[in-house]
Amino acid sequence: MQSNHRLTLETKVWEKDWRRLILLEECKHIFERILTPCHRRLLINNVEDPKAVAGYAEKLVAKGILDEVVIVDSHIEAALTHFKLSKESLGIGFAYSAAELVGIFTCETEYLAHFAGDCRMLHYSHWCEDGMNTLAENNDIAVVNPIWNGDVLEVEKEATERVRNYCLGYGFSDQCYLVRTMDLLNADLTQIHPDSRGFPAYGGELFEKRVDGWMRTEGRLRATDLTATYVHGGQL
């Protein structure tokens, strides 16, 4: 689907949260707190009946809450081929990687912002607009994200330097990220970096660990915006 925006903003649903995010329309809280104009879409992954869930999601398109609905199963094989990955290479991490890989593979805008279904901004924010400008000006930066759960001390501990309102350092989380689409589309995600540690064991060699490894290999940094915070899971 063509978009006139620079930014695609996406979130995802799966079997255990799609009713809350779609039927109760809770996904709108993710989109409405991003004040930057964007193409808003929903990724449907790992549900029992993708077509039925997509039918419910299309009602949110009619209401103007969404612009697009993407069924992950319809694109995952092509995405895996593009990234030179397979279900076998991802192993138990496949379920935690499919939506994100398809999100990158099918994105048609210059920038992509992703929120997990259980994440949202604490306040209304322009952080995506500022983040796109930061990415445009700094090729060494591969990803921008807000502070996670307001934990400034953790952000500062992981950072190597501070520039204006950003802490810079290595690291990547699939909870919330803003990237140049082409950077990730062209990234080599086939390698696992030895310094990519601290990711959940249940996820195996999942997407976020592979992106972290690519960033470390290429010397690409994360910029955490100290003026914005997102909350996750139990913090909602």
Image: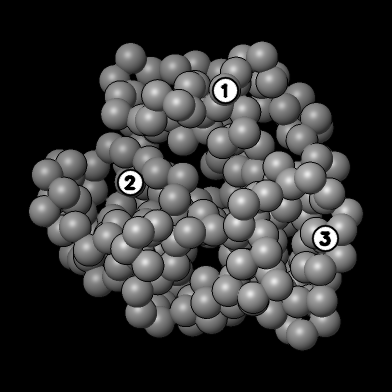
Residue that appears at 52% across and 77% down: 29
Quadrant in the picture for the C terminus: bottom left
Q: Quadrant of residue 75?
A: top right
Q: Which residue is mark 2?
A: 222
Q: Is residue 103 above or below residue 19?
A: above
Q: Which residue is mark 1?
A: 92
Secondary structure at numbered mark 3: helix
Label located before the other in sequence (3 or 1):
3
Residue that appears at 30% across and 67% down: 229
Q: Which label sits on residue 54?
A: 3
- The reply to whether dot 2 and dot 3 touch (C-beta < 8 Å) is no
Query: Can residue 52 be seen here?
Result: yes
- Give the residue type at disc 1: Ile
Query: Residue 163 at x, y = what percent?
Result: 18, 58
Distance from label 3 to label 1 (Cα)? Answer: 25 Å
Query: Residue 67 at x, y = what percent?
Result: 75, 72
Label located before the other in sequence (2 or 3):
3
Residue that appears at 66% across and 37% down: 98
Query: Can residue 106 be seen here?
Result: no
Distance from label 1 to label 2 (Cα)? Answer: 26 Å
Secondary structure at numbered mark 1: helix
- Give the residue type at disc 3: Ala
Decide if residue 11 is on the left or right side of residue 124: right
Label 2 or label 3, whichever lies nearer to me, is: 3
Query: Depth check: 44 or 153 in front?
Result: 44
Quadrant in the picture for the N terminus: bottom right
Label located before the other in sequence (1 or 2):
1
Q: Which label sits on residue 229?
A: none
